[in-house]
Amino acid sequence: MSELSSNEKLQIMNDTKQLILDYLVEQAEINATALKSYENDTLDKYDPEIKKMRETEAIKLRDRIYELNRHIAVIKRM
């Protein structure tokens, strides 16, 4: 089996990096879309327990988006 050249190794690493970035960006977009459904909905029509659960879920989604964006920023710097 032949050894990979430095250029081939770099290309594989860059391709892998791009695949990871694409995945993380896609996940951030999915979470952002889900968050919009919580933010665009008026909570007045829900009873207090459901309203509290929806607010908690929105907080979780914001946190996920923030963490994904942090990971994306770190990987882009590599």
Image (tube, rainbow, N blue to C red):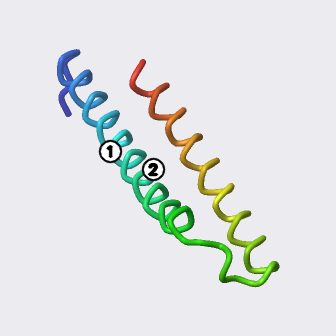
Q: Which residue is mark 2?
A: 28
Residue 52: name its quadrant: bottom right
Q: Secondary structure at mark 1?
A: helix
Can you name the residue that lies furthest to the right here?
49
Residue 20: name its quadrant: top left
Residue type of the residue flagged with mark 2: Ala
- Around disc 1, counting alpha carbons within 10 Å, would you say few (fewer than 14), some (14 to 19), or many (20 or more)? few
Residue type of the residue flagged with mark 1: Asp
Task: State the image coordinates of residue 76 (x, y, percent, origin top left).
Answer: 39, 25
Question: Which quarter shows the C terminus?
Answer: top left
Q: Which residue is mark 1?
A: 22
Q: Which mark is residue 10?
A: none
- Name the residue: 25% across, 24% down: 9
In the displayed structure, 28 sits above or below 56; it is: above
Task: State the image coordinates of residue 19 (x, y, percent, origin top left).
Answer: 31, 43
In the displayed structure, 61 sits above or below 63; it is: below
Can you name the residue that lies furthest to the front here?
44
- Name the residue: 71% across, 64% down: 55
Is disc 2 in contact with disc 1, using a CB cutoff of under 8 Å?
A: no
Task: State the image coordinates of residue 58 (x, y, percent, origin top left).
Answer: 64, 60
